[in-house]
Image (cartoon, helix red, strand yellow):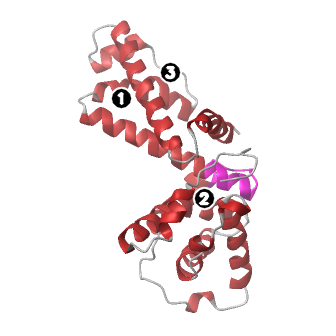
Amino acid sequence: MGGDKSVFQTTVWSDICLVRTLDQGRRDAAINDLIKAYWKPVYCYLRRKGLDNERAKDLTQGFFEEIVLGRQLVQRADETKGRFRTFLLTALDRYVTSVHRRDFAAKRRPKEGIIPLQDLDETSVSVAAEGMSPGSTFNYVWASELLQAVLANVQEGCEQDGKQVHWQLFHARVLNPIISGAEPPSLAELCERLNVAGTVKAENMIVTVKRRFQAALRRHIRDHVESEEDVDEEIRDLMNILSG
């Protein structure tokens, strides 16, 4: 996205270009992908700004409906002027300021909105980023969503290939301990629980899923940077954001 690449670059400028295409279908798909990627970081950013849950939801919906879609914000993004996220947050701050000057509740919008905020668990997305600045919260939630998407892709691939037990081993031995901060169960215990013939086989099955995860992560990151050389740097930045 330009700049010194000191933080995880998560916007694909080729996708921004698709928003400007004359092909209505491709344009709508590109806009929907960007909204899907950014709505939760925007919501969490507003929560860390001190807004309550309902107000943050209202402003998130309004920002995407009025500014991103209504004023074609994405179409006006300029790659030469820096990161898209900075451009987006600047527009968001201006929007929040302007909302205070008018009756936001009177604005017409689709009954259900364009973003699935009604099912949003505010605790799960705010506690994880407790103590962070609004900008750091935005980056953290963005990186978390990206990682969850990669893990979902790996799980789906394992299930499609008949490797459900591989995924269950990986989840129990590797993923869940990271998420919960608990000690991983022993391989012997997992072998007995999942009916796996020996710890050596279990280790190999876990390695298989690890390799799938690494490959899926690299594919996803590769779609978000300009060159192959940037992939390792971007993965390091992603992990730094999450560990921070």
Q: Start and end of the magenta stretch?
A: 126-141
Residue under label 3, please give it: 184
Residue 152's quadrant in the figure?
A: top left
Amino acid found under the numbered disc labelled 3: Pro
Where residue 31 sits: x, y (%)? 47, 68
Distance from label 1 to label 3 (Cα)? Answer: 15 Å
- Choose the circle earlier in sequence order: 3 or 2: 2
Which mark is nearer the camera, 3 or 2?
A: 2
Residue under label 2, please give it: 41
Relative side of 4 to 128, left or right: right
Say if 243 sits above or below 9 in the image.
above
Callout 2: helix, strand or loop?
helix
The answer to if 1 sits in the magenta stretch is no
Residue at 45% across, 25% down: 210
Residue at 43% across, 24% down: 211
Where residue 36 sits: x, y (%)? 48, 61
The total of numbered circles placed on residues is 3
Distance from label 2 to label 1 (Cα)? Answer: 28 Å
Q: Are marks 3 and 2 in contact (CB under 8 Å)?
A: no
Amino acid found under the numbered disc labelled 2: Pro
> Is residue 184 or residue 108 the one in the foreground?
108
> Is residue 226 or residue 119 the one in the foreground?
226
> Is residue 204 or residue 193 the one in the foreground?
204
The answer to if 135 sits in the magenta stretch is yes
- Choose the circle earlier in sequence order: 2 or 1: 2
Residue under label 1, please give it: 167
Relative side of 200 to 220, left or right: left
Amino acid found under the numbered disc labelled 1: Trp
Distance from label 3 to label 2 (Cα)? Answer: 31 Å
Residue at 44% across, 36% down: 216
Neighbourhood count class around disc 2 (C-alpha, 10 Å): few under 14, some 14–19, many 20 upward:
many
